Amino acid sequence: MCITCGCQDHSDHHHDHKQPQQSIRLEQDILKINNRYAKANRSLLDAKNAVALNFVSSPGSGKTTLLEKTITGLIAKSLIYVIEGDQQTDIDANRIRKAGADAYQINTGKACHLDAHMVGHGFEHFDIKPNSLVFIENVGNLICPAMFDLGEHYRVALISTTEGEDKPLKYPDMFYHADVVVINKVDLLPYVDFDINRCIENIKKIRSKVMIFQTSAKDGFGINAWCDWLGNLVNNTNRVTV
Ligand SMILES: Nc1nc2c(ncn2[C@@H]2O[C@H](COP(=O)(O)OP(=O)(O)OP(=O)(O)O)[C@@H](O)[C@H]2O)c(=O)[nH]1
Ligand SMILES: [Mg+2]
């Protein structure tokens, strides 16, 4: 197989690369269909004045831990529903239920991201009440989830201090499409080679006006500011859409 374009020509690598054009066409079609489902998801949420946030990051940045802390901080004030996306297992949905919120687990199997169709079916498992918060934890992956609008109102990209401050530059799509970036695991800053100011500069090179929070989902640093921002969202009519 040609590693340049994935085609099945074994003879040499200097043939016309016609297949990428077909791949681009297929990708455009898939995204067009996805965007229709995303629009329907957003309409359903808007009709209930519910706010949805799509959490994206590399595996292990702390999405579920941040959600657990968020649920603890907000459950008395807001109704919270969580869609969990992982290739396999219901570990994360169980963690969320234990923290006190309704959760539905989607297993994507071979797929490396959630899409809007899956998420729409996920919503069918909830009786979403007005003015609630809907969190969608995407599959841990810094590439593919960037392309898929799920019908969220805000996209939240996490980066943790163990990943290196260069990640926003290396995976710009993910940060370009984020409305909010959470720099998590700040409790580890004394122990890791991570320049947080450089990281913020890098994020802003990709997305100059993005909102940035610094948190430790482990010890609770920054969680109050984060929960205050979330708590105000349900009453904010000037929402930014991705
Ligand atoms: N020190 C420290 N550890 C953290 C923090 N947040 C999460 N962790 C740890 O990091 C590991 C991964 O956390 P998860 O919340 O499962 O990460 P995730 O992004 O949900 O992972 P996937 O769903 O697999 O992509 C766990 O061992 C957490 O306890 C933090 O702020 N500080
Ligand atoms: Mg998780």
Image (cartoon, grey):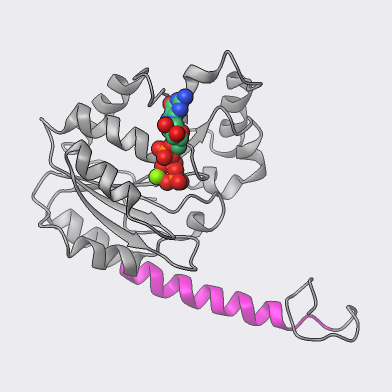
Q: Is residue 173 above or below residue 19?
A: above
By secondary structure, the bulk of the magenta-drawn segment is best described as: helix
Q: Does the stretch in magenta take in 35? A: yes
Residue at point 27%, 32% (across, down):
70
Quarter of the image with the N terminus is bottom right
In which quadrant of the rendered view does residue 227 lie? top left
Residue 186 position within the rendered picture, expressed as x and y whole percent measured from the top left: 49, 20
Ligand 2 found in image quarter: top left
Q: Does the stretch in magenta take in 195? A: no
Residue 224 position within the rendered picture, expressed as x and y whole percent measured from the top left: 28, 20
Residue 37 position within the rendered picture, expressed as x and y whole percent measured from the top left: 32, 69
Residue 50 position within the rendered picture, expressed as x and y whole percent measured from the top left: 17, 48
Residue at point 41%, 65% (across, down):
108
Residue at the extreme top of the image, as rendered? 190
Residue at point 61%, 75% (across, down):
24
Tell me: 123 left or right of 181. Answer: left
Q: How many marks?
A: 0
In which quadrant of the rendered view does residue 215 lie? top left
Tell me: 21 left or right of 42. Answer: right
Of residue 176 and residue 71, the one placed in the foreground of this image is: 71
Confirm whether residue 156 shows in the render.
no
Q: Is residue 108 above or below residue 130?
A: below
Confirm whether residue 4 shows in the render.
yes
Magenta highlight range:
16-37
Residue at point 38%, 26% (across, down):
217
